[in-house]
Image (tube, grey):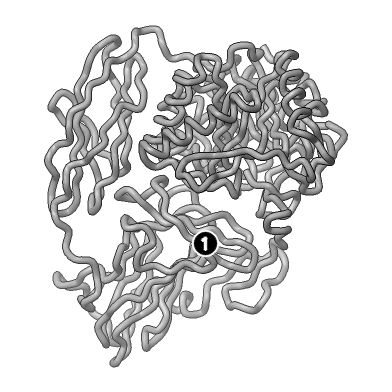
């Protein structure tokens, strides 16, 4: 989620920090504006290359790939952060999920008039043929090369929810010794992800050295257990492209990230685990051994957090800033809201730690004492108040045990200072499942079983159980209250039936919620997140009637669209909205319609 109001493609952003964005973009030919409503077009060079490939043609001077060809790109899998890459306007970062292989990938986010271009200068040989490729997903993504000495090339793909390989070819000129390889997104569109960039061809002398066998992983730890599964996490290993997981000495699974869940285990049983790192050169020695004991049989329901909440609950985000929506005090939030998420906590200079400062001046002189008193009054009425960490600008990074401890300590301090009942995880800059799980468990040990833990991932974060956000939710399932996925600002996505659904429909809500319901979360841990008004998000707004129909479809198999779940989920938790302020700006139309409907579910 982000902090702005009503600006297409930008979402919620604190206007006092950066101002409104226009959402306007340029065509791929920089400096020229596209006609309204048209999608971006491939550059002529890309068309030429594509036509040549389509008709089996080759460029003059090109030849067949030989055994001596190498990948000339450096840090092609972003395992060394952004080393060797330059991204415009600070638009790029590396993330641990999603990745195509290894433990890292590039995430670059277009903003304003910047298309998030990331570039690397690659050493090549003159008068030689090269194949340029990269694996991408997310928003519109372009891949190309300039300075080839012949015809510069590019190719692109529209937004995609799964990894897709872009590929094109080029030939260097007689005096060309380097080319500029680039990736970029599209103005106003979602962030794109890229991994495993390749400039395959004769060795130009600048590529990465051949891999060596990686070292053994360190930091292996148990992130969570159920009666039939154990979740593990470990530190990334430099140069590794994958990891093997061993249970009681036998290999049971192979993964590309730094976490894994071993399933099919017996209840109340002790198991030992080890991990190795792998790459093209071989497999490392095994890590130190950890042991875990599965829970007693009979588990599998929702988490312990949520005592005192109704069976079906409505969550609303309360804005600690003024962005054009109605300014509210906590006491102004309608009674239909059962969980109020205070947005947002702020990152500090200490890795993993957060703080909170009430924006009294922006909220009409609302004092800290009034704020605390209003929280206590809501709690006396049976409501839960949580502090939300993240949002579009909330770059809180929990990537090791130290930052996990800092996160838990700082959130618990805020709970004690203001009286919050728990925490909401709304991180949109990537999430490390191992250490965020560790942080939340440390917080639960401090706060006890009454702790409320909510999450608000973006749709792309919940497409697969291997994604960091989804894995975190599963890791802490026994203490998790609810995951309210943001079903907006996302474009088209895959449903649990493998079909593509467009946002803004009953089917989008139900078919995507089905992924979580079938992926291991209890129905009581699944909620539908939507904007309270058209101004609350750049895209994806649906009327309260659509929300109510989606809830009916999932809980009773009535009012469904084209997608129909295979069963009912009468314990579905409910719905969430951004925000109570935008709801108030529309006369509380959302909560007046959706609130009673949620509370009347079976």
At x 32% / y 42%, what residue is drawn?
257
At x 45% / y 44%, what residue is drawn?
351
At x 54% / y 67%, what residue is drawn?
89
From the viewer's side, name the closer residue of 20 and 591.
Answer: 20
From the viewer's side, name the closer residue of 597 and 399.
Answer: 399
Work out which quarter of the rendered image holds the N terminus and state it. Answer: top right
From the viewer's side, name the closer residue of 409 and 384.
Answer: 409
| For residue 38, above or below residue 243 | below
Which secondary structure lies at badge 1?
loop
Is residue 526 shown to the viewer in this render?
A: no
Tell me if 459 is positioned left or right of 595 in this view.
left
Is residue 351 shown to the viewer in this render?
A: yes
From the viewer's side, name the closer residue of 222 and 250.
Answer: 222
Q: Quadrant of residue 568?
A: top right
Q: Position of residue 86 (x, y in %)?
A: 43, 69
| For residue 376, above or below residue 256 | above
What residue would you read off at disc 1? 91
Q: Position of residue 96 (x, y in %)?
A: 39, 46
Tell me if 122 is positioned left or right of 272 in this view.
right
| For residue 97, above or below residue 316 | below
Tell me if 506 is positioned left or right of 155 in this view.
right
């Amino acid at each position: 989620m982000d902090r702005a109001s009503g600006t297409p493609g930008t979402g919620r952003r604190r206007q006092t920090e950066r101002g409104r964005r226009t959402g306007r973009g340029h065509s791929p030919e920089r400096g020229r504006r596209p006609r309204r409503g048209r999608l971006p077009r491939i550059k002529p060079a890309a068309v030429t290359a594509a036509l040549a490939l389509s008709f089996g043609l080759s460029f003059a001077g090109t030849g067949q790939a030989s055994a001596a060809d190498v990948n000339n790109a450096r840090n092609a899998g972003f395992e060394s952060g952004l080393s060797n890459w330059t991204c415009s306007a600070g638009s790029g970062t590396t993330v641990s999920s999603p990745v195509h292989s290894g433990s890292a990938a590039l995430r670059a986010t277009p903003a304003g008039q910047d298309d998030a271009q990331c570039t690397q200068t690659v050493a090549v040989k003159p008068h030689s043929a090269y194949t340029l490729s990269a694996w991408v997903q997310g928003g519109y993504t372009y891949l190309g090369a300039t300075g080839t000495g012949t015809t510069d090339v590019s190719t692109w793909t529209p937004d995609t929810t799964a990894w897709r390989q872009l590929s094109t070819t080029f030939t260097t000129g007689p005096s060309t010794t380097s080319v500029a390889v680039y990736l970029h997104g599209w103005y106003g569109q979602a962030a794109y992800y890229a991994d495993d960039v390749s400039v395959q061809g004769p060795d130009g002398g600048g590529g990465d050295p051949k891999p060596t066998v990686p070292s053994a992983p360190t930091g292996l730890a148990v992130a969570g257990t159920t009666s039939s599964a154990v979740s593990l996490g470990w530190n990334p290993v430099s140069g590794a492209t994958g990891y093997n997981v061993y249970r009681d000495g036998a290999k049971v699974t192979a993964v590309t990230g730094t976490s894994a869940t071993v399933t099919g285990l017996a209840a109340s049983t002790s198991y030992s685990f080890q991990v190795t790192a792998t790459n093209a050169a071989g497999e490392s020695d095994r890590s130190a051994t950890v042991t875990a004991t599965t829970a007693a049989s009979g588990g599998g329901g929702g988490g312990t957090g949520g005592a005192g909440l109704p069976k079906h609950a409505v969550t609303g985000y309360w804005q600690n800033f003024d962005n054009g929506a109605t300014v509210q005090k906590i006491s102004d939030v309608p009674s239909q809201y059962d969980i109020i998420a205070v947005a947002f906590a702020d990152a500090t200079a200490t890795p993993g730690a957060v703080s909170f400062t009430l924006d009294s001046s922006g909220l009409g002189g609302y004092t800290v004492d009034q704020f605390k008193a209003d929280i206590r009054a809501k709690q006396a009425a049976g409501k839960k108040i949580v502090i939300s960490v993240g949002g579009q600008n909330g770059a809180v990074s929990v990537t090791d045990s130290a930052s996990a401890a800092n996160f838990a300590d700082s959130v618990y301090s805020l709970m004690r200072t203001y009286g919050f009942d728990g925490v909401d995880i709304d991180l949109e800059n990537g999430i490390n499942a191992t250490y965020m799980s560790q942080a939340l468990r440390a917080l639960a040990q401090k706060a006890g079983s009454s702790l409320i833990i909510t999450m608000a991932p973006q749709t792309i974060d919940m497409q697969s159980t291997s994604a960091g956000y989804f894995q975190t939710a599963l890791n802490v399932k026994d203490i998790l209250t609810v995951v309210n996925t943001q079903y907006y600002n996302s474009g088209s996505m895959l449903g649990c039936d493998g079909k593509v659904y467009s946002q803004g429909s009953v089917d989008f809500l139900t078919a995507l919620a089905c992924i979580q319901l079938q992926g291991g979360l209890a129905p009581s841990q699944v909620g539908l997140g939507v904007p309270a008004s058209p101004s609350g998000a750049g895209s994806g707004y649906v009327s309260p009637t659509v929300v109510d129909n989606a809830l009916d479809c999932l809980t009773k198999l009535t009012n469904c669209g084209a997608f129909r779940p295979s069963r009912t989920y009468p314990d579905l938790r409910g719905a969430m909205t951004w925000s109570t302020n935008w709801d108030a700006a529309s006369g509380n139309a959302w909560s007046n319609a959706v609130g009673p409907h949620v509370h009347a579910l079976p």
